Each structure stands twice: as structure tokens, then as C-alpha cells.
Image (tube, helix red, strand yellow):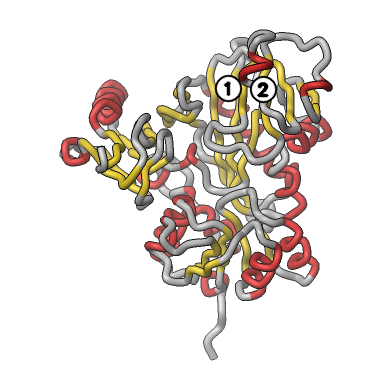
Amino acid sequence: MKQSNNREKTIGILGGGQLGKMTALAALNWDVNLQFLDISPDFPAGKVCPNFVRGDFHNETDVYFFGKRVDILTIEIESVNTSALHHLEKEGKVIHPRPAALDIIKDKGLQKQFYRENGIPTSDFFLVQNKEELREPSFPFVQKARQGGYDGKGVAIIRQQEDLDTKWMDTPSVIENLVDIDKELAVIVARNEQGETAVYPTVEMIFSQEANLVEYLLSPARIDDDIEQRAQALAIETINAFDICGLLAVEMFLTPSGELLVNEVAPRPHNSGHHTIDAAVTSQYEQFIRAISGLPLGDTALTHPAVMLNLLGEPGHTGPVHYQGLEECLAISGVKVHIYGKEITKPYRKMGHVTVIDTDRERLFEKARFVKNTLKVVSSHI
């Protein structure tokens, strides 16, 4: 009689975007049975996974009945209906990350309080419901919407009194000190149900000031061994504190004095791990499947130094997408282009990413700058 194993269990993923697509591509290597729930099979994951269920991951009924049809339930986006997840968990459904952790992480106020309560270093903060509660503010500071922020949205830097009239977001918020930052770092850590962990080398993120999105990601980060070891240890401490099975991307600030502060986390595959598809022994997407399925965790070592660039829609371009300069970039050795399959481009929308690999750091940056200046995401209507 044939015995079943974890690889043969059906995995349900809430969300059908680019993270789901790249997870599906990794899972196809092992013929893992994936199903997705999202509102349209035209989304990126629907183009590579035939088992796409139409539904709204914000809707309690849709999430509940989707969860009933799979063996393991997970996410590729945090903003899902967790009431249904708690109900399914009580019925014995395997859910990663656990709903209680997801409730904390999707609310940036609860997330910051969690760090404080668990001794995880983070910047000073307080919570407000509205502007009226902001008495005698100390400028500059950062306002973060407690819920709904993503891809640079939901964050405002308030530098002076006038900014309160032009930049303030009318929503319950976290107010943080504006940290003096030397580098912005990220560490992706995997953890299985037995509590075993595997951590990727730290990456360095360089942000676009205009879009507030990652412009370049450098792997490995330009930090010394002591900071590398402390960053990885902090990532492991954080995933253990949340008791999460799967992946956790831990974004950190490195201060000029060498202090590491956790900024925020994401309990799923993350933008800061895209490069692992082309530059690590085990991609974050394969590792995600391994971790939630009870399979052995994979080797996280880098195979090449890498620079990752997000492909963002050009300002002023909205409509059917066209990739300008694609052939010139594909002609260069070590340039790996990943297009997500979104049919409509919008300003600063994530449409894909490029990983550049090379053993020589100077050539690596030279190629990355060429791609940055050459490959443009524009609308074919213009």
C-alpha cells in the first residue's frame, strides 16, 4: 500500500500575486499540489497554477471554505481574514503562520508592542488614534498606519509643523522616533514545526526616496562579521518569539553606533529574498514549501554575490505594459529577469525584478546600473 507523505499534502495559499507565482514555480519541481484563493485567475499565480479558486481573502466565508479543502493553509499577503483562520485552527486545520501571530503582525501597533514586551530591540514609539492625541510633537518623527500599509504606502515622515497639515494620515498610527540609520538590513529566517531554523545571509537595502521602495538590494550586505552574526541571531530570536512555522523576513535598522533595531517583519516570502532564486543554494520559495510542509530545511548559502532591482512602473505611465530595453539587458551575462505577468502598469507598481550575479563586485554594480538605466516599465499606450 502506498504511504502518503508531506509532499503529497495539498497546500492552500491565500493570495495570488507575484509571491504566490514564484512559490508555485518552486513547488512545481516537486509536483506539490498547490491551490490559490484570490479574486481573479488573471493574477500572476493563476498563470502558473491551474488550481485557482475565485474568492476574496478578506471575506470570512470564502477563506473558511477554501481552508476546508486543503491540508495546510498559508498566506502570501498579511491582510487576510483571520477570523476564519481562528475558526479553522480550532477545527484542527494546520495553518502557517499561526493566526495569533498574524493578528499581531498585520497591526503595526501590536507588532511594536510585541517587540517591547519580548525584549526585541526596536525604536521608541507611542500609539495614537488621531492627530488630536499628538500633543507637543517632537520633530522629526515617522507616522505609520497601523493597518493596510504596503510597498511604501502608509508611511509619512513628519519633519515640521507644516507637514502635519499636508502629510498626516487620518488613521490610527504608530509614532516613531526618526532613527539615525547607517544601513537598512533584512534577514530571512525559516523555521519548521520542530523549531529548527535556517537563516539566510543578511542583505542591505537601498531605498528610492521618491517611491519609498527598495531600489537596490545587495547580497551579501556590506557589514562586518560581528554585525552579520548579531543580525542573524536577532532574526532567529524574533521568529522564535512569534512561534512561527514558515518564513519570517526581519527588516532592521543599523545605527551608526552599531545597534540593530527591528523595524518590521513579514511572515511569508519577501521582496528582500527575491535574489535567492538565482544566488542561493535554496531559494526562499523552496524554503517556504519545505518549512510549512515538514520537509528538511534547505541550505541557505549564497552561490554568487548579487544585486536585486525591483522593476517598477515608470511615473506617468498607466495602461497595458511594455518592457523597454529588455533585450539589451538579457544580452548581458548574469542578468536574470523575472516578470510577474501583470497586464497593467501603474506608477511605481511592482511589475517584476532583476537579479544580477557576478563574482566581481565592481562588475556586479556596473551591470546593475546598466539595467537600472536601460530596462523601463512603460505603457504601450504612450
Q: Residue furthest bottom?
A: 1
Q: Residue at x 29, y 37 (%)?
A: 378
The amino acid pointed to by label 2 is: Trp
Q: Earlier in the sequence, mark 1 or mark 2?
A: 2
* SS category of the residue bearing label 2: loop
The disc label shown at residue 194, or none = none
Residue 156 in view, yes or no: yes
Q: Residue at x 37, y 29 (%)?
A: 315
Q: Residues within 10 Å of mark 2 (few under 14, many from 20)?
A: some
Q: Quadrant of residue 317?
A: top left
Question: Position of 112 compared to 158: left or right?
Answer: right
Residue 305 in view, yes or no: no
Quadrant of the image containing the N terminus: bottom right
Q: Residues within 10 Å of mark 1 (few under 14, many from 20)?
A: few
Q: Nearer the viewer, residue 58 or 179?
A: 58
Q: Residue at x 42, y 34 (%)?
A: 348
Q: Quadrant of residue 163?
A: top right
The span from disc 1 to disc 2 (Cα, nearest Å) is 39 Å
Question: Residue beneath label 2, please?
Answer: 168
Q: Please tell me whether residue 301 is drawn above or below residue 158 in the rendered image.
A: below
Give x and y (percent) for residue 300: 48, 44
Does the residue at mark 1 contact the one at mark 2 (Cβ under 8 Å)? no
Question: Residue beneath label 1, please?
Answer: 226
Q: Please tell me whether residue 226 is drawn above or below residue 379 in the rendered image.
A: above
The amino acid pointed to by label 1 is: Asp
Quadrant of the image containing the C terminus: top left
